Image: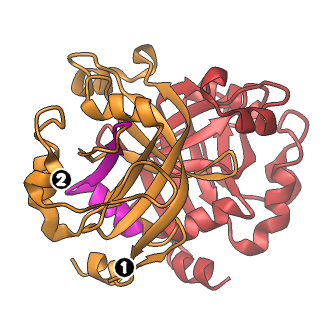
Chain colours: A red, B orange
């Protein structure tokens, strides 16, 4: 089924539900175009600087971190709920050691406006160009979060991605809502 | 009409549409409880650290900045579209000089879980406790954004507010969707 353009605000409730469980797939690529997918359960969406923005958080230790630093863009892909095993896999192994697209039979379709590809099998896609980044500041976190999320440090970089394209399967809204 | 609890993901598409135009109302209060409302057109919503989070950006020069620094919480209120004149007013004058609630006949209903009140006349309310803050880093912005949004500096602080309560008018979804 061909993908259709959407407003970035379309299906946001469904997208956030999937973000909560089982998670979304953050795709980046190296300079040669080789893609990698990382599972994310954290992210925010909205408007900053008058632009639609998707914020994602990536730890410096992650392979994805080096890729985004290299190409300065990424895509966020919303999987269907029956893709839970793929989402779990992409959150378990590192792209340094495994070609996750090959291992899971995922199709990397070239991005329309960014160097990172999308995952064709997913429901919704946001193509994002990094327009700002900053870092989680340890001293400005609550003690609870510091203890729970950062026992080993490795504090996240927050990437602010301008959503330069958003599109979805024509029936993505229904399929995500129904299951 | 009594307010009903909602999931933070409910009506998010509608909320983001109103954020884009005419804007939302960010409410904070001083230590004595005196509230102030500031219009915002920027913000993001999602999940970080396993918690529902509303991110808002406030310039250090703003009165709201001093209030959030004092109480460490805020509420985000989604107005109905026919409240456009109130939203415009709250984006024009400073709470240092005017009591915006009194001037516009707004009702400050105490927050359920935060010190900042809500605006009763609005459709949807998110009560937020600041769990992290950092700053927009000038060197990490695109030139375009730096030129357009920061000709005078005054770079925003990004407040990450954990959404500790979310509720709305029972008919907020329909009324916001219908225009």
Q: Measured from the top left, where is residue A34 in percent x and y? A: 72, 38
Q: Measured from the top left, where is residue B153 in percent x and y? A: 27, 16
Tell which of B84 and A109 is nearer to you. Answer: B84
Crowd tier of the residue under label 2, counting other residues whose Cα lies within 10 Å: few below 14, some 14–19, many 20 or above: some
| Quadrant housing the N terminus of chain A | bottom right
* Chain part drawn in magenta: B13-31
Tell me if A151 is positioned left or right of A121 in this view. Answer: right
Whether discs 2 and 1 lie on one chain: the answer is yes
Crowd tier of the residue under label 1, counting other residues whose Cα lies within 10 Å: few below 14, some 14–19, many 20 or above: some
Q: Secondary structure at mark 1?
A: helix
Asked if residue A143 is positioned above or below residue A76 in the image, the reply reads above
Disc 2 chain ID: B
Tell which of A137 and B74 is nearer to you. Answer: B74
Q: Please say whether residue B16 is one of the residues in the magenta stretch.
A: yes
Name which residue lies at 85% across and 44% down: A99
Q: Please say whether residue B175 is one of the residues in the magenta stretch.
A: no
Name which residue lies at 48% across and 70% down: A11
Q: Is residue A105 visible?
A: no
Q: Is residue A17 visible?
A: yes
Q: Measured from the top left, where is residue A137 in percent x and y? A: 61, 23
Residue where numbered disc 1 is placed: B173
Residue where numbered disc 2 is placed: B101
Asked if residue A162 is positioned above or below residue A83 in the image, the reply reads above
Q: Secondary structure at mark 2?
A: helix
Name which residue lies at 52% across and 62% down: B165
Name which residue lies at 38% across and 23% down: B142
N-terminal of the pair, mark 2 or mark 1, is 2
Tell me if B21 is positioned left or right of A67 in this view. Answer: left
């Amino acid at each position: 089924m061909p993908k259709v353009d959407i407003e970035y605000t379309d299906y946001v409730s469904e997208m956030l539900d999937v973000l909560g469980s089982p998670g979304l797939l953050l795709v980046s690529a190296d300079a040669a175009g080789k893609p990698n997918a990382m599972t994310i359960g954290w992210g925010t969406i909205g408007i900053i600087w008058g632009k639609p923005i998707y914020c994602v958080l990536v730890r410096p230790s992650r392979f994805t971190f080096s890729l985004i630093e290299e190409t300065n863009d990424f895509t966020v892909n919303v999987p269907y709920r029956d893709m839970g095993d793929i989402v779990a896999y992409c959150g378990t192994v590192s792209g340094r050691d495994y070609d996750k697209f090959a291992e899971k039979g995922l199709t990397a379709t070239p991005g329309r406006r960014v160097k990172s590809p999308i995952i064709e099998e997913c429901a919704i896609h946001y193509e994002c160009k990094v327009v700002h980044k900053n870092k989680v500041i340890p001293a400005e976190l609550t003690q609870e979060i510091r203890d729970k999320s950062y026992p080993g440090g490795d504090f996240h970089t927050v990437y602010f991605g301008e959503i330069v394209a958003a599109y979805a399967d024509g029936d993505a809204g229904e399929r995500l809502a129904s299951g």
